[in-house]
Image (tube, rainbow, N blue to C red):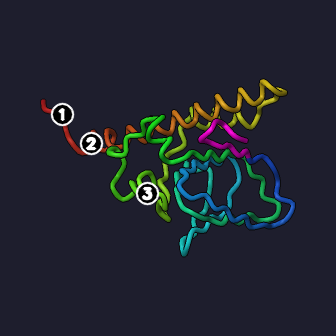
Amino acid sequence: RRIDGHSFLHVMNFEAGESYSLTMARPDLVCFQILINGSYSRSVADRVDMMTPSAILVTNCPQSTSDVQAGMKLRGVLIVVERQHLLDHFKLNVDRIPAAYRPIFLKETGLSAGLNLPPSVAIIAAADQLLSCKFGEPLRSIYMQLKATEIICEIVAQVNALHTRRTNGFHKKPL
């Protein structure tokens, strides 16, 4: 589902009837993978990560393969945003990101490793609301666009606060 001219939303709310592999090519796009229930493996080059509800994975790699086992119940969302749109429109502050993860946001080819963020209550609630939407069209499209944008805003705010939180943990305030 297209969110706007620069973003897409994929909802996962199903049980896999059989094991499958899905290879996706998505150059120059930043992906936010939010899993509420279930798990699957994600391969990029020679790296394999297990996707679980314990983290939000932020990636930008030209191609990945996801493997799902038969019987797995997946519930979550994938939001894909053009990298430059994320920087220009949402004002993601790359200087706040640990240097090792900046290629996700600064390079078209990204990074094989992803940035793991803790799943905030607000992000999980918005993702669950997306998955539970009962509206018919056109309200459904409007609602999905707004909730997906809310999730992007929450993630950008969390990323923009990364450096601040780390600095506060390492420096003591003067007495």
Q: Dot 3 corresponds to which residue?
A: 107
Residue 175: give x, y in percent of width and height: 12, 30
Within 10 Å of disc 1 (Cα), the crowding (few <14, some 14-19, many 20+) is few
- For the point 85% across and 65% down, which residue is it? 18
Q: Residue at 47% across / 35% down in the picture?
A: 90
Give the dominant element type of the magenta stretch: helix, strand or loop.
strand
What range is drawn magenta here?
A: 1-11
Which quarter of the rendering shows the N terminus? top right
Element marked by disc 3 = loop
Vertical arrangement, residue 82 with respect to residue 157, above or below: below
Q: Element under label 1?
A: loop
Amino acid at circle 1: Lys
Residue labelled with disc 2: 167
Q: Is residue 42 magenta?
A: no
The residue sitting at the bottom extreme is 46
Which residue is tagged 1?
173
Residue in the picture at 50% in, 45% down:
118
Marks 3/1: CA–CA distance: 36 Å
